[in-house]
Amino acid sequence: MTPSFVEFVGSGAACLTTAAFFPQAIKTIRERKTDGLSLSMYLMLVLGVAMWLTYGIFIGSWPLIIANAVSILPQLAILFLMLVQIWNGRFAAKSLPLASPEALIAVRKDSGAVGA
């Protein structure tokens, strides 16, 4: 195989795998829902892509550099939304009863408390 054919295959694979992350990122950002996604998987994925990017820089492989530099962007966006929702979920529960009387009533009704 010629080196140009090998680069063509690598570039094609890089384009496809990079583009594959954008539909999930667009859907997640639009819906603002990450509850069905695995935090540990996205942490490992972002770390792995960052390492591939670093490796591409070390060996000077433009398909690796460009593909991983572009694909890490939607992955970081999803990871950021996941972390924000986890952060808000942990602290919103503590402040929920103080938010409004309606919220307090809703919490009591959901918990089955008598006298709500």
Image (spheres, rainbow, N blue to C red):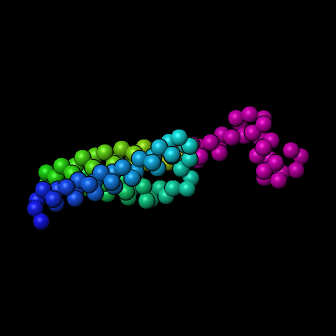
Residue 115 in view (yes/no) = yes
Q: Is residue 78 left or right of residue 113?
A: left
**Residue at position x 78%, y 36% from top?**
102
Q: Which of 106 and 20 is in front in this view?
A: 20
Q: Is residue 99 above or below residue 76?
A: above
Query: Quadrant of the rendered structure where residue 80 is?
Result: top left
Secondary structure mostly seen in magenta is: helix
In the image, taking residue 84 as reference, residue 2 lies left or right, namely left
Residue 105 among those drawn in magenta: yes
Question: Looking at the figure, which quarter contains the C terminus?
Answer: top right
Residue 112 x/y as whole percent: 82, 53
Extreme top residue here?
100
Establish if 102 lies above or below 45. above
Furthest toward the left, the residue is 2
Name the residue nearer the viewer: 17 or 82. 17
Residue range highlighted in magenta: 88-116
Q: Position of residue 88 (x, y in %)?
A: 57, 43
Q: What residue sits 36% from the left and 44% below the top?
A: 73
Above or below residue 95? Residue 15 is below
- Residue 76 or 23: which is nearer the viewer? 23
Q: In this view, does 26 lie to the left or right of 36?
A: left
Q: Residue 45 location in percent, x, y? A: 37, 57
